[in-house]
Amino acid sequence: MDFATLIQILDSTVRLATPLLFACLAGLFSERAGIFDIGLEGKMLAAAFLSAAAAAVTGNVWLGVGAGMFASLILAGIHGLASITFRGNQLISGVAINFLASGLTVLLGQNWFGLGGRTPALTTGGRFEPITLPFADAIAPYPIIGPIYAELISGHSALVYLALAMVPASAWLLYRTRFGLRLRAVGENPAAVDTAGVSVIGIRFAAVAICGILCGLAGAYLALGLAAGFGKEMTAGRGFIALAALIFAKWRPWYALGATLLFGFLEAVGNRFPNIDLGLFTVPSQFMQALPYILTVIILAGFVGKAIPPRAGGQPYVKER
Amino acid sequence: MTLMKHLAAATATLALSAGMVAADPALIFDLGGKFDKSFNEAAYEGAQRWATETGGTYKELEMQSEAQREQALRRLAEAGSNPIVMTGFAFGDTLAQVAPDFPDTKFAIIDMVVDQPNVKSVVFTEEQGSYLVGMMAAMASKTGTVGFVGGMDIPLIRKFACGYAQGVKAVNPDATVIANMTGTTPAAWNDPVKGGELAKAQKAQGADVIYAAAGGTGIGVLQAAADEGILSIGVDSNQNYLHPGKVLTSMLKRVDNAVYDAFKAGTALEAGISVMDLAAGGVGYAMDENNAALVSDAMKGQIDKAAKLIGNGTLRVHDYMSDESCPALSF
């Protein structure tokens, strides 16, 4: 493998990891506050649909992103209502959201555009264009540094940089602010937070809303950045891979970056080399596709270290009376 | 007594013919969805053509999950639909179980062979059509490297890839063919993001013409190819219009004709295997105003010559499904 190939694979890694990173951070906020969320997939799908629909109608990519976040927030609100206010089972609510998004997107898409659930193909203006960072052209001719800067770092769409910026922002919010401390506490021991006079319900709803916004960005990036429009079930399981990445990352923001980049890298390698020839035997493409899940199972089995979920995760908070 | 017998016979005939009149054909779409701009949409167009020509009506059903297949088939058969046409290889096993239970109903399955006395199996020689577009790809390629993106990794899709690779090698024996499959589950038919990423990866390896045989995933491949400024080849339906001037051609698989013929035959549908090959107009390549500038007369002449040779049997294109191997491409 030469240097140019490596750069191309890493470039692809960044693109593939971005939606996973958004979704993984989304799940991180929700689960750190004690709300399990397997509805990441559904929220991404709804966001991808509405962002593509809005961008197709208005021709403005940022209105599309806004619409995507709106769709995702609505579903996040439903999840919050069911699992926080009415203390329902969080897993069941999440599954319901996945089904809802899967059916509703195609139904509305067919009703609005009559293209079988697809949105019209987006043209310039409705899609994210790659951003060329300053001096990219000037630095490009230099060896090593040139390709790294011009191809790998420069030339992605705005949401990629936003996703990367979200990692330190999330870490700061969770570990350096009062809100973050309370959010983490709500996921570990909500009774203590309640005793201190802070609203558990309020913090949990805030966490679910952040989760909705981030899922909205993930979906919008899929539809407006990577593809040019929405297609039925286009998330193709990325929400579940993000959940796997979240466990892999042990519910920590910087680890989440590492986990999603690793998963993105594995997919990029699988795309580039469908069958990896190791001399003695050939690694089939199916193995590469399954690798993220295999790695997660290994993590869960405790070989690489323990992944301990937030202690109050999955339990609705009931105030003692 | 004889009068009674006659009466009874007449009533029975009447009842039978009444049933015949009421029998509308039905069409079941596979998981890719009715409007996949490709395989299933071609079936839909065939059914629509029959409906407008004859003024008849038909029932249609879109599969949402694997588990629905048997239920859907039985329900349509019990409701008296006849004939029932279904698209896609995945119906094979289900139909083989259901067909014997409804001996009076005629079934037609596209892309699969089911050996039952009331089933018509329509198969296409995709390798022949793919061979022709492969030749065109090799002629249009400047780098000598061309790509193939398949949907779900099944023998049928490998058949496309194998025919394509043979066509490419026939024009340029030194050409490189990069083949990728999107996945191993039905989700691979609906993942335009991964399709686009595969196209970009192939472009990075030098491919400048990419053939997509991947249902909804193919839309992402065509989009990425257009974005990257390289050519793509559509599949099943004519997809040249999706990106005018950037789609080299489309490998046509006349699923619409197969559905149209089955509907037209109605309850008199003949069972057996029907092979829709190049000579029968079952497969081919698409030319229209969107790709006229991309395909020169010299290219067209050479391809039509090969088409003629394939049609009269002089030139044989290897079928991957005949022995699960491909001389021009390793998977």
Image (cartoon, rainbow, N blue to C red):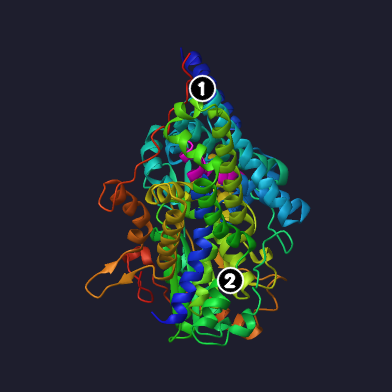
In this rendering, position of residue B223 left or right of residue A300: right
* Camera-nearest residue between B40 and A50: A50
| Residue located farthest toward the left when viewing the structure as drawn | A280
* Camera-nearest residue between A218 and A234: A218
Residue under mark 1: which chain is it in? B
Q: Position of residue A71 (x, y in %)?
A: 65, 41
- Residue B252 in view in this figure: no
Q: Residue at left 47%, top 80%?
A: A4
Most frequent secondary structure within the magenta stretch: helix
Disc 2: which residue: B232
Asked which quadrant contains residue B327, the reply is bottom left
Q: Amino acid at mark 1?
A: Ala
- Same chain, marks 2 and 1? yes
Disc 1: which residue: B12
Q: Position of residue B174 (x, y in %)?
A: 43, 87
* Camera-nearest residue between A153 and A128: A153
Q: Position of residue B263 (x, y in %)?
A: 58, 45
The residue range painted magenta reads A27-46
Q: Crowdedness of circle 2 by 10 Å Cα count: few (<14), some, many (20+)?
A: many
| Quarter of the N terminus of chain A within the rendering | bottom left
Location of residue B249 with respect to A238 vertically, above or below: below
What's the CA distance linking mark 2 and mark 1? 58 Å
Location of residue B90 with respect to A319 vertically, above or below: below
Q: Residue at left 42%, top 46%?
A: A251
